[in-house]
Image: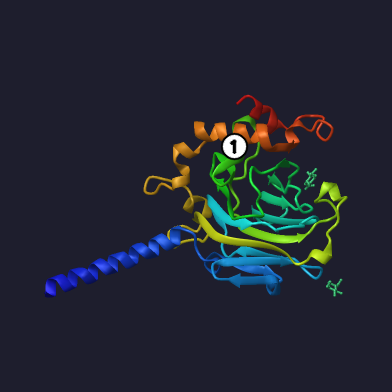
Amino acid sequence: MAVSYASSSSVSATLLVLMMVVSLSSAAKFEELFQPSWAQDHFEYEGELLKLKLDNYSGAGFASKSKYMFGKVTVQIKLVEGDSAGTVTAFYMSSDGPAHNEFDFEFLGNTTGEPYVVQTNVYVNGVGNREQRLNLWFDPTQGFHSYSILWNRRQVVFLVDETPIRVHSNMEKQGIAFPKDQAMGVYSSIWNADDWATQGGLVKTNWAHAPFVASYKGFDINGCEAVPTAETTDIASKCSSNGQKRYWWDEPTLSELSLHQSHQLMWVRAKHMIYDYCTDTARFPTTPAECIHHRHH
Ligand SMILES: *[C@@H]1O[C@H](CO)[C@@H](O)[C@H](O)[C@H]1NC(C)=O
Ligand SMILES: *[C@@H]1O[C@H](CO)[C@@H](O)[C@H](O)[C@H]1NC(C)=O
């Protein structure tokens, strides 16, 4: 009896540890990873859901408590239902300072029944101007969909429900700077951008339809936390794979898209892309260098 009692309690202790590990690596609670960064009174918590509201007084935003080097961040979002014209909901990673790097998802609202547009952008050393825009293959206001950014030394991949919609590859060999030496925070916000967001700013926010509400759940960050440890004060070396440790995002299979993912990306670009800075010759008479190299793929 004593033996079986002891073993069952060690089984439950093992289970408890397993459950803790699982809950840390799967979708974590908002408060574990994030905190409101402005307009806390425009936050509403409903069980596992977080709602951010935009009205004529304020939008709202949140930020990760930590910064990260590499990994994957995911959140599930249900965008503003009905009339969302003039509003922008953003989910992005960014480092600090004038030479910052940034990976953006921006969801541009629209009048009722007209499609949301997803704009992505990549800033490297403080310079953006790398917009791409697409329509989605579903209505993002009718349910939750996952939006992810995968970041490693070889590529930055934007994913929607695990389908890649954009890849920004490391082309340092061609002399093109790649963001890989600044830790980044994870952010989201909703705000009024009716000077540019919908039909280039022609359609203004209709405040009679406020509050505009974006809902979130499934917060997940699986990356190297940029906190110096006792062994190393250097984040870059802490977050590098080496002899003793190998981070999952440094696996060779993640250095580029799989064949299946490449096909998915080709489908997205063929069927859903509505704007690509790479082909905007009026804006960029000289094709941006990273676009020229991309074409060879
Ligand atoms: C905001 O909207 C409310 C409700 O429509 C209105 O009563 C209020 O005056 C507005 N406030 C501002 C600052 O425009
Ligand atoms: C809004 O809907 C119009 C009409 O369908 C479309 O042209 C536009 O791209 C949509 N999105 C934005 C952000 O303007």
Is residue 206 shown above or below 139? Answer: below
Where is residue 248 shown, x and y percent of the image? 44, 46
**Total numbered circles:** 1
Q: Is residue 244 left or right of residue 193?
A: left
Which amino acid type is shown beneath numbered disc 1?
Answer: Asn
State the residue position of label 1.
170
Inspect this view and state whether residue 275 appears: yes
Where is residue 156 shown, x and y percent of the image? 59, 43
Q: Secondary structure at mark 1?
A: loop
Which residue is located at x 67 percent, y 56 percent? 79
Q: Nearer the viewer, residue 69 or 228?
A: 69
Is residue 84 shown above or below 153? Answer: below
Which quadrant of the render holds ligand 1? bottom right
Inspect this view and state whether residue 99 appears: no
Which residue is located at x 78 percent, y 66 percent? 210
Q: Is residue 173 left or right of residue 275?
A: left
Residue at the front extreme, as displayed: 113
Where is residue 165 shown, x and y percent of the image? 62, 40
Is residue 71 shown above or below 255? Answer: below
Where is residue 96 shown, x and y percent of the image? 67, 57
Question: Which quarter of the rendering shows the N terminus?
Answer: bottom left
Question: Which quarter of the rendering shows the C terminus?
Answer: top right
Is residue 278 shown above or below 46? Answer: above
Q: Nearer the viewer, residue 283 or 165?
A: 165
Residue 15 falls in which quadrant of the image?
A: bottom left
Q: Is mark 1 within 8 Å of ligand 2?
A: no
Which residue is located at x 66 percent, y 44 percent? 136
Which residue is located at x 73 percent, y 33 percent? 278
Q: Is residue 287 left or right of residue 78?
A: right
Q: Nearer the viewer, residue 235 or 39?
A: 39
